[in-house]
Image (tube, rainbow, N blue to C red):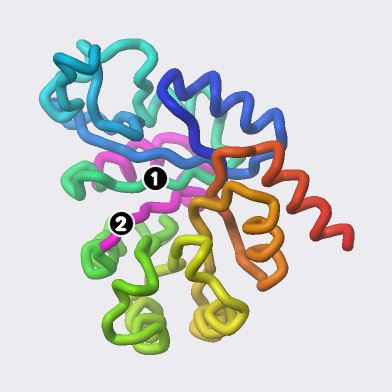
Amino acid sequence: MAHAPENTLDAFRLAIRLGATGLESDVWPTSDGVPVLSHHGRVGPFYRRRAVTDIAAGSLPATLPSLEDLYRAVGTGCQVSLDVMDPAVTAQVVAVANRHPGALGRLWLCHPDWETVASWRGLHPRIRLVDSTRLERIEEGPERRAARLAAARIDAINLHQSDWTGGLTALFHRFGLACLGWDAQHERQLDHLFRIGIDGVYSDHVDRMVTRARARRSA
């Protein structure tokens, strides 16, 4: 999945043209509860930046799109992965996706607290839920975490690319979980993840990611 800096819509359109099958961003609520996409959660010049959460949607700059803007711009044919920065916005994120046919089954909601993620299952059965964490933070061990995620009907685990091994991929797959790897920026990292059977990667370099994925499929 590709993620983009602010002026996100143009960057996302370009990512899709380059072959990305998924898009990634952080999602924040405005002061009036509208889900907007921003990796920083702040707007304005550095010396007087304001938090998105303190601003009404109508007062945000045009370069900072809402989730509604994203679906209107690129449709619902690609996967959309969102790091939910404030769980209070989750229900509204699902409501926006629900207005766009085909979006819910391609919506992946990520958060570092898996129990918070599990609490979202009741919002809609078709959304994809993701435990986004690091291996060192899984105090109970990978197998017990995998069992807990499966029991809670969480769909995937997202680890830093350096955490993944073939054994871990096989373990989580055994529990029916998709395996995602973030911060995969270099060819050797991408090749490693594809080689061990990863299901999805997050990268800033769309062309590099697409090239390595195609090379793996044709090998």
Residue 75: x, y in percent?
Answer: 56, 30
N-terminal-most mark, 1 or 2: 1
Q: Residue furthest right?
A: 219
As drawn, the label of residue 123 is none
Mark 1 sits on what residue? 82
The residue positioned 35% from the left and 20% from the top of the image is 64
The residue positioned 66% from the left and 56% from the top of the image is 190
Left or right for 20, reference 179: right
Check residue 106 for magenta coloring.
yes
Looking at the picture, does residue 101 appear above or below residue 14?
Answer: below
The residue positioned 53% from the left and 85% from the top of the image is 171
Looking at the picture, does residue 12 appear above or below residue 122?
Answer: above
Left or right for 85, reference 88: right
Residue 53: x, y in percent?
Answer: 15, 30
Amino acid type at circle 2 is His
Answer yes or no: do the residues labelled 1 and 2 have beta carbons within 8 Å? no
Left or right for 90, reference 98: left
SS at mark 1 in the image: strand
Distance between the alpha carbons at the discs numbered 1 and 2: 9 Å
* On-image quarter of the C terminus: bottom right
Compare residues 152 and 96 and report the one nearer the observer: 152
SS at mark 2 in the image: strand
Looking at the picture, does residue 142 appear above or below residue 184?
Answer: below
Instruction: Tell me the magenta residue range.
Output: 91-112
Amino acid type at circle 1 is Leu
Residue 26: x, y in percent?
Answer: 35, 40
Compare residues 105 and 82 and report the one nearer the observer: 82
Mark 2 sits on what residue? 111
